[in-house]
Amino acid sequence: MLDEVIDPHLLGGFVAEAGSLVLDASLNGQLARLKARLTSA
């Protein structure tokens, strides 16, 4: 069963959840990962 929910705060991309697995392909998620890599170096 697929439940589709549209989040108006999401700038672009998508976030998919299946049980405890979360696939974050959102623009916010990508920017957060980039910031973490740049600040940890």
Image (tube, rainbow, N blue to C red):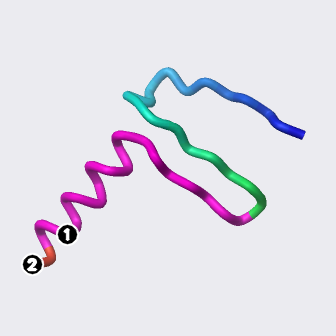
Q: Residue at x 26, y 49 (%)?
A: 31
In the image, 15: left or right of 28?
Answer: right
Residue 13, percent across and down?
Answer: 45, 35
Give the residue type that dot 2 points to: Ala
Residue situated furthest bottom in the rendering:
41
In the image, residue 8 above or below residue 12: above
Hey, which quadrant is residue 26 in on the image?
top left
Proximity of marks 1 and 2: CB atoms separated by less than 8 Å: yes
Numbered disc 2: secondary structure: loop
Give the side of residue 36 with respect to residue 10, left or right.
left
Q: Is residue 41 left or right of residue 1?
A: left
Q: Which residues are magenta?
A: 20-39
Q: Is residue 31 magenta?
A: yes
Disc on res. 41: 2
Residue 3, label in figure: none
**Label number found at residue 37:** 1
Q: Main secondary structure of the magenta part?
A: helix
